[in-house]
Structures are given as C-alpha cells and as structure tokens.
Amino acid sequence: MIDCKFTNYIDINVLYEKYGLKKSIRTLFRIGVDGRIYILEQEPCGNNRAQFRLLILDVDWDEEKLKNSECHNLGEFDSGFYFIHPIGDNILMVRCRSNYNNGNPDKNASILTLDGEVISKYCFGDAIRDVYVRPDNTIVTSYFDEGVFGNLGWGNRVGAPPIGKPGLVVWNEKGEQIYCADRGIADCYALNVDNNNNIWYYYYDEFKLVKCSGDKEIDFDPHIEGAKFMLPTEDGQSVIFDSGYDKYGQYEVYYLYKNIENEKIRFLFEENELLRIYCESYGSRGLFVDNNNRMFIRRFLSL
C-alpha cells in the first residue's frame, strides 16, 4: 500500500466567498496545459440558459498551495458545458452532446476570450467523454459508446457517420480533424495528455492503455476493468488508475515496465483518508476535491 500524504489544501469555500460564487451541481474543475486550475460555475437563469463565471487559480504544485486567483464573468450562454480548457490566451468550452439536425449539427465547441466574446464555434460530434488541449494547441476528444455507434440523428440511415466513430479524434485550432484512432474503440473510458504532447488513452472493450506519440503507439495492459481516471507519473514509469468497476473511491498504481501486481494507493491528509474524492488530472498533475470542499493538488514525479 502506498500512502500519498498531502501537506496543504486549498479551501474552495473561501474562494467562493471571496468572489461571491455559488457552487452548482455542474461545477467543472480542470487542470490546464499552463498548469493553472480552472473552475467553471454555471448559474441557471431560465430557458436552458446560464450565467458563466470562471475562476482561475495559480498554484504551486510542489508546495501544494494557492498562489493567486482571479475571476472572470463570461456572460450568459446556453447551459450544458461539460469541459473547459485554456487554449492560447483564450478558453475552449465544449458540450457533451450534439444533435445531427438533418445535416445542420449543433456546434458544441466554442473558443472564447476571457471577456466572454465567442471567437469561433465547431462541431466535435456527439457523446464526448473527455477533452484535452495539448501543449501544441491541438485538441483531443474522446467518445463514449453513443458517439462511436451513433445517436441523436448520427449514424442512422439518413444521418452522417458519427464524428466520434474512431473513439478518439485530434483537431487543430481551426476545428479540423488531423488524427483519428484506429483500434475499434467502443468507448474511450479514460484520457490524459502529458507535457511532451503524448496522448494516453484507455478503452473498452479490451481495457488496454495506449501511449500515443505521433505515429507511434505503445500498448500496455493495466489489468483493470472500467477505470475512468488515470495519471501518468512524471518519470514515465507508472500510472495511477482508479480501480474500476464496483471499486468506487479505490485507486492503484500500474507499473509500466515491471512485471509485478498493481499496488494500492491511498490519499491522506493529517493521517485521515480523503472521502468522496472528485479527481482530475493533466499529465502528472492531479487535483482531488473531498467532501469538505477542500482541494488537494500534487505533481506526481514518481512512485
């Protein structure tokens, strides 16, 4: 058993009080390619619309502390955004779903300024599981089964093939496809991107882990079924996974190049195990929010 002991935490309640924010049921936490933490709040205002406010945190990943924070009012938009990432000096916001609409599909990806001005909109397809922006500003989208096989007008007799049919797609900043996976992915369960521009993905139904470096792919078998979270360590030797089906709240370490069993890992603060963890990762950086609205952060160099 590995004990990961955090030394500090960021009090989300204090930040919300500072900026007059209210926590909603659709609060989004993301780690950006720039190492900052992005928290998107959506306050409903009727007719499926919401006011969006974006909290950006500058943090010290090694000291596990907040350095600075800022809050931006993005304005009012249709509700339903599930993903947010910085892209250059702007913000990418993406909805999970997109109706085909008889050839006029919903544009479910928007690039905005921090003042809320929409610069461009694209359709990234339906049933998006996850979104990452890489260091080179290309965008990676993964899809769950409805995005692969078709729904909401995609993939039927008169609709176009689902955009998410490959299970994983890479886009440029203009919303043009530049890469598609070719593995018969039925559902891309987990996704990550590291600071070397590598894509890590884990998919159903083989539950293989793939490291994609340009045209080169390396397969690994973590011996886990149904994981939704993964984090590769900075040294490139191991990956933290959640333990998958029927093991909510449990985590383990898979060693990429050692023929040994996975090792359990716990997350602790002041000797107490964190409860009801919500977690996000970007490369080797991870954030964990517990049931007391405390955010714990760490860059995992090695295990």
Image (cartoon, rainbow, N blue to C red):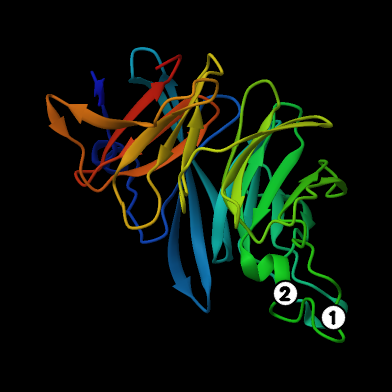
Residue beneath the point at 56% across and 38% down? 221
Quarter the C terminus occupies: top left
Secondary structure under the numbered disc 2 in the rendered image: loop
Seen at 69% across and 56% down, the residue is 185
Left or right for 272, reference 258: left
Q: What residue type is labelled 2?
A: Gly
Q: Mark 1 points at which residue?
A: 159
CA distance separating discs 1 and 2: 9 Å
At numbered mark 1, what does the secondary structure look like: helix, strand or loop?
A: loop
| Disc sitting over residue 95 in the figure | none
Label drawn at residue 150: 2
Tell me the crowding category of disc 2: few under 14, some 14 to 19, or many 20 or more residues within 10 angstroms, Cα based.
many
Residues marked 1 and 2 touching at CB (< 8 Å): yes
Question: Which amino acid is tagged 1?
Answer: Gly
Residue extending farthest to the front is: 259
The picture quadrant where one finds residue 144 is bottom right
Percent position (x, y) of residue 6?
A: 25, 22
- Categorize mark 1 by other alpha carbons within 10 Å: few (<14), some (14-19), many (20+): some
Please tell me in which quadrant of the rendered image residue 173 appears.
top right
Residue 35 percent coordinates (x, y): 53, 24
First in residue order: circle 1 vs circle 2:
2
Residue 114 visible at all: no
Q: Which residue is drawn at 68% across and 66% down?
A: 147
